[in-house]
Image (cartoon, rainbow, N blue to C red):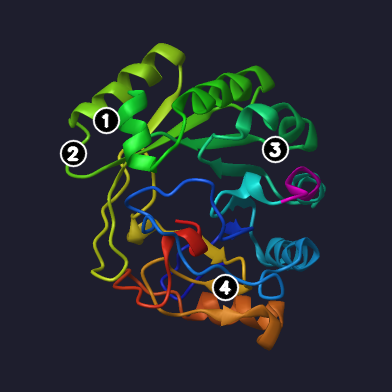
Amino acid sequence: MYDRFNRNINYLRVSVTDRCNLRCRYCMPEEGVALLTHDEILSYEEMLDVIRESVKMGITKVRITGGEPLVRKGIVSFVRNVATIGGILDLGLTTNGILLAGFAADLADAGLHRINISLDATDPVRYREITRGGNINHVFEGIEAAKKAGLYPVKINCVVRQSSDEPDARSVREYGEKKGLEIRFIHEMSLADGRFTIVENGHGGDCLHCNRLRLTANGMIRPCLFSNAQFSIRELGVRKALELALDEKPERGTVNLNGRFHNIGG
């Protein structure tokens, strides 16, 4: 399906939860955030309805995000159900990797194609500082489990403050080269200030060629990460919400004053 700027919109990012087992400094405050209630969060069946309708309209690529998607109960079964939807050519998942070692094989068996893992430093102390308590050894174990399970390519998302030449970023690059991983550097963004750049070695932030819509955990179709526009599938129905999001997709992102990274999915 094409938007009004003739971009082929074929990519849907699905946030299955706003919950996370880390408190990364660039994502949320140390004390955490107000979380959605159980009734506010979509059921898996509601999410599957959105994905099915999206595929009918032209979506061929689906990525499961959060929060941290692996903290939601039943995630493997959800992936298996998504994988059965005909027309999806690329099914991925983004995770912080903390729980991945225990899920990688089952996710691959369920039909997941590939995985992106967040890693902003390789030094255990620095990683613990950035994530406010994360154990980097769990991430390393998750990466190895993903490789063993055949979730190729295994991509690493590394957030940088100023430059990919920063010491932490250089260490991640060296680790990735050693382990045969693809590294993407994402410059720290601000939704409220409208600050974003094109991802190094990736496609995010490239408004001219943007091909994505987003489904939030509480049922909002968002046409752009850096926009206030959102359309409720529960209030409008799935098809109408998707059509409105497609019609309202901006030529370029500006600011987002009503969302946060943890509940949109980045």
Circles 2, 1 touching at the beta carbon (< 8 Å) = yes
Separation (CA) of disc 3 from disc 4: 23 Å
User: What residue sits right under mark 3 in the picture?
Assistant: 112
The spot of residue 117 in percent (x, y) is: 49, 35
Disc sitting over residue 169 in the figure: 1
| Label 2 CA crowd tier, 10 Å (few <14, some 14–19, many 20+) | some
Quick one: label 3 or label 1, which is nearer the N terminus?
3
Residue type at numbered disc 4:
Ile
Front-lying residue, 9 or 94: 94
- Is 194 included in the stretch rendered in magenta? no
User: What residue sits right under mark 4 in the picture?
Assistant: 221
Magenta highlight range: 73-78
Front-lying residue, 53 or 119: 119
Separation (CA) of disc 3 from disc 2: 32 Å
Circles 3, 2 touching at the beta carbon (< 8 Å) = no
Separation (CA) of disc 1 from disc 4: 33 Å
